[in-house]
Image (cartoon, rainbow, N blue to C red):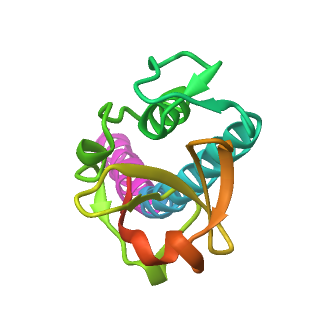
């Protein structure tokens, strides 16, 4: 009897140690995978937001356009609409959007970052990579512009990462 009890205790201890150490070892890669997964998720959301934004190229600009209306946009209703489609809530106005997320320098921009113009801020667009931003204003409506030349370079103010 003593041997059977001892054997049962040893087996129970072995199972407990396996669960304890096996579970701990298994948890470490899962944590690393979660961080990598978050980066992939942000990157894929950014790609999706940019792709959706490009579908609206040429849609007319209308100051004060109602959020959710896709027949016209102003700059902040455009960004708010696109980000909302992918589960990111942004304030309605560009000045308020410029306080969302976290600051990112111009040299560290990634696709999906919000970029802001003027001082005080009253224009927003979405960085799409390659020094370009998708946004909407005036006659062209939704368009793509370079932030590294001309008017947009001279009026660039800041950027925020919300993904």
Q: Quadrant of residue 111?
A: bottom right
- Number of marks present in the image shown: 0
Q: Is residue 82 above or below residue 103?
A: above
Please identify the dominant SS of the magenta region. Answer: helix
Is 151 left or right of 7, judged from the image as shown? Answer: right
Please say whether residue 11 is one of the residues in the magenta stretch: yes
The residue lying at 52 percent from left, 28 percent from top is 62
Tell me the quadrant of the picture where the N terminus can be found.
top left
Q: Is residue 71 visible?
A: yes
Near-viewer residue (52 or 152): 152
Task: Please provide percent x and percent y for residue 38.
Answer: 49, 53
Residue 138 at x, y percent in the picture: 57, 42
Q: Is residue 10 above or below residue 70?
A: below
Residue positioned 50% across, 76% down in the render = 153
Q: Is residue 163 magenta?
A: no
Q: How far across and how far down the image is residue 81, in percent?
A: 51, 28
In the rendered view, tell whether residue 102 sits above or below residue 154. Answer: above
Q: Residue at x 35, y 47 (%)?
A: 3
Q: Is residue 87 above or below residue 47?
A: above
Q: Residue furthest bottom?
A: 107
- Magenta-colored span: 1-25
Q: In front here: 22 or 45?
A: 45
């Amino acid at each position: 009897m003593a041997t059977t009890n001892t054997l049962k205790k040893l087996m129970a201890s072995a199972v407990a140690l396996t669960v304890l150490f096996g579970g701990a070892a298994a948890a470490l890669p899962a944590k690393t995978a979660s961080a990598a997964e978050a980066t992939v998720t942000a990157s894929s959301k950014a790609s999706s937001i940019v792709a959706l934004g490009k579908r609206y190229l040429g849609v007319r600009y209308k100051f004060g356009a109602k959020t959710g209306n896709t027949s016209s946009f102003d700059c902040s209703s455009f960004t708010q609409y696109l980000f909302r489609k992918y589960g990111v809530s942004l304030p309605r106005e560009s000045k308020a959007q410029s306080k969302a997320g976290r600051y990112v320098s111009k040299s560290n921009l990634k696709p999906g970052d919000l970029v802001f113009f003027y001082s005080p801020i009253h224009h927003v667009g979405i960085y799409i990579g390659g020094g370009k931003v998708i946004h909407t204003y005036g006659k062209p409506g939704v368009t793509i512009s370079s932030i590294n030349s001309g008017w947009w370079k001279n009026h660039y103010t800041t950027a925020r990462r919300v993904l």
